Image (cartoon, rainbow, N blue to C red):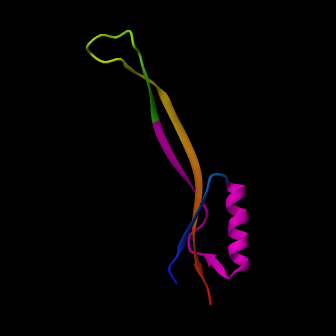
Amino acid sequence: MIPIRVKRGSKTELIKAVRELEKRGFDYVTPIKAVYKTKKDFVYNENKNIKGGYKFYGMEEYVSYECWMKKVN
């Protein structure tokens, strides 16, 4: 069968979902790994004139966990 991706926001939620799939006959294709996404934050400053008023405010990093599973006969 085609492998499916299991993706959750926290590792405990992912483990619960994976255990339910294991009961239904699925097995791991890849191990559980963390996926990081970074996002830049900008703040608009209304006091600036023509050049534009966006100011770099920092970066945020989001973490989610995923693994791939496949049905085993």
Report how many numbered discs are placed on residues in the image: 0
Residue drawn at x 70%, y 58% is 13
Q: If the image is split into quadrants, where does the C terminus sit?
A: bottom right
- Placement of 15 over or under 47, stated as above or below: below
Q: Residue 70 sits in which quadrant?
A: bottom right
**x 70%, y 76%: residue:** 22
Residue 35 shown in magenta: yes
Check residue 32 for magenta coloring. yes
| x, y percent for residue 11 | 68, 55
* Residue sitting farthest toward the left: 50
Compare residues 3 and 47 and report the one nearer the observer: 47
Looking at this view, name the residue that lies furthest to the bottom.
Answer: 73
Farthest-out residue, front: 46
The answer to which image quadrant residue 6 occupies is bottom right
Name the residue rendered at 52%, 84% in the picture.
1
Which image quadrant is residue 29 in?
bottom right
